[in-house]
Amino acid sequence: MHINIALNPLDMLDALVAVGILYVFLQKYAFPPLLKAVRERQTRIDEDLAAAERRHQEADQLKAELETQLKQVKARAEVAMSRALRDAEDEAQQIVTRARQDARRLVTEAEAEIATERDRALQSVKHDVADLALAIATKVLGQELSDAGSQRLVQEFADQLAGSGAGGDPAS
C-alpha cells in the first residue's frame, strides 16, 4: 500500500498564516486570562500550604502545652491523692484512739458500777444476815430483845462481818 502525499506550498503558507493568526489571537485574548488563573491558583495553593504549615505548628505547640498541663494536673492529682490518703489515715487513727479511750472509759465506769453494786449487795447481805442472826438469837434465847438492844446487836454483828468478811468468806 502506498500513500501519496502531495505538498502544495500555497497550502502550507495558508496553514502557516492561519497558525500565526491563531497564535496572536490566543496570545492576546486567551493566554492572559489562563495564565492569570494559573498564577492565582498557584498563589492560593502556596497560601493554603503556608496556612496548613502554620496550623500544624500551632497544633504542635498546643499539643506541647496540653501535655505540660496534663503532667501538671497529674502531679496535682497525685499530691491531692497523697494528702487525702494521709488525712484518711490520720482520721482513722484518731477514730481508733477515740474508740480505745471510750472503751477504757466504759470499762472504768462499768468496774466502778460493779464495785458500787457489789458494795451495796454486801451491805444488803450483811443487813439481812444481821436480821437473821437477831431472829435466831431471839428464838434461841426465847425472848424479845428491846429495839435499842437489837440495834446494838445488829451493829456489833455488822461490824464483825465488816472486819472479818471484807476480803474473805463471811462464814469464817
Image (cartoon, rainbow, N blue to C red):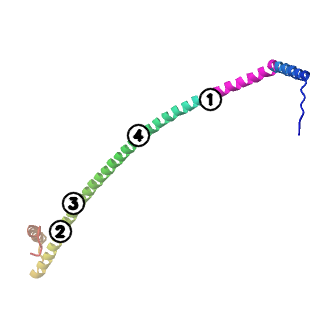
Left or right: 157, with 106 as reference point: left
In magenta stretch: residue 46: yes
Q: CA distance from mark 1 to mark 3?
A: 92 Å
Say which label, 1 or 4, has the lower sequence index: 1
Say which label, 1 or 2, has the lower sequence index: 1
**Rendered position, 139 above or below 109:** below
User: What residue sits right under mark 4 in the picture?
Assistant: 75
Q: Quick one: label 1, few (<14), some, or many (20+) residues within 10 Å?
A: few
Q: Are marks 4 and 3 in contact (CB under 8 Å)?
A: no
Left or right: 48, with 17 as reference point: left
Question: Element type at marker 1?
Answer: helix
Question: Element type at marker 2?
Answer: helix
Along the viewing direction, whichever of 58 and 46 lies nearer the viewer: 46
Which numbered dot is residue 122? 2
Say which label, 2 or 3, has the lower sequence index: 3
The residue under the point 32% across, 47% down is 90
User: What residue sits right under mark 3 in the picture?
Assistant: 112
* Residue furthest out toward the front: 2
> The residue under label 4 is which amino acid type?
Ala
